[in-house]
Image: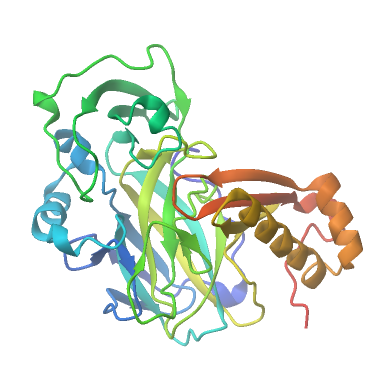
Amino acid sequence: MALISLKPAAVREDARPSALHFLRATPETVHWGYFSPEIKPALTVKSGDLIQAQAVTHHAGDDPTLMFDEDIRRIFTEIDPETRAPGCHIMTGPIYIEDAEPGDMLEVRYFEMVPRFNYGSNLQANWGHLYQEFGETERITIYKLDRNANTASAMYAYDVPDKYMVPGRITHCPECDRMPALPGISIPARPHLGTAGVAPAVNAPVSTIPPGLHGGNIDNWRIGAGARMYYPVQVKGGLFSIGDPHVSQGDGEISGTAIEASLDVLFQIILRKDFSFPSPLLETDDCWIVHGFGADLDEAMKNASLDMLHLLTEHQGLSRTDGYSLMSVAADFGVTQVVDGTQGIHCRIERRIFPDKGTFRDPG
């Protein structure tokens, strides 16, 4: 079904999988709230290996009766809340890739994103874009997934009297005041990873909340089954982690979260030493998408524009003036998210407009 799987792109001969690894999310294999080069790898792989890994949402406690199993319960109860910092996301990993060095690229091919349960949670959060306009209140909406229809619909909602301040808060929905929500409305299910990336080359833990050149909390719903992401390696081994799984999200993520729901993810990591790119880059069968980040949308827009210009000139052979013209008439810019501190803009351009269908080539 399209919900959980898309036909994978053809795998190059030098990227045929040599092994399949399974990575459960447990208190021993996750790191909560941060990226760091100091984390002991949970798994070591070779280029081309396949990984079946579990990604756990930190919002499973919004209804533990629907979104907990024993492993998830252990993560929520055994990891000290004081250590869930400076960010909020549960990250599975890191994965050490043999021979990966700073300056290389990781090509991550996402093949399947399978919901672990048929439920997810959306939070009207204190970091949401309209928090003041909603009287500085928080509200949780629980969604149920229909796998056959590839849709999600709201089951119920409830108000939360206190702010979401400690990642992994557990509420007791059987005791809460449940209210109807979104009657008769179904939305498309788009399982994807909100957060994934490599360890930044810094000595202190880096929050999982803002996106950056290492990847992180990009929150682009197109990073799902069938997508190929390219992450610039910053430290030896790459140290790649996944987390913040979603069942669906709109561009902007305006209330503060998507439909947060745990996923089982099948992906392949390919070490690329034949090209470089300055920021996380998304490839699909029909387009390229670059990501720009900034303190505000103007800065993010400029960074996305410059990185798309880089792709058009360095990897498609256009002059700067031709690339600038092409962006204005053929590239689509969108707001990825406005709720992660560092804001995001993505820029999409179709591959079919290029003579070679937009093959990503080494400028050297």
Residue 75: name its quadrant.
bottom left
Q: Is residue 283 visible?
A: no
Residue occupying the point 18% across, 64% down: 83
How far from the left and from the top, in percent, is residue 34?
A: 32, 66
Looking at the picture, tell me which residue is in the foreground, 355 or 60: 60
Q: Give the quarter of the image for residue 157.
A: top left
Q: How is the image coloured?
A: rainbow
Q: Is residue 104 above or below residue 193?
A: below
How far from the left and from the top, in percent, is residue 241? Answer: 37, 66
Residue drawn where x is 44% and y is 32% of the image: 130
x, y percent for residue 175? 8, 25
Q: Count all numbered tags in the image, as a single digit.
A: 0
**Looking at the image, which residue is at 57% across and 59% down?**
228
Q: Residue 202 vs residue 275: left or right?
A: left
> Measured from the top left, where is residue 196 in percent x and y?
43, 61
Relative vertical location of residue 296 with respect to residue 139 in this rendering, above or below: below
Give the vertical position of 188 relative to 237 (above or below).
above
Drawn side of residue 70 relative to residue 312, left or right: left
Residue at point 47%, 66% (across, down): 268
Q: Is residue 222 above or below residue 148?
A: below
* Residue 42 visible from this viewpoint: yes
| Residue 160 picture quarter | top left
Q: Quadrant of the C terminus?
A: bottom right
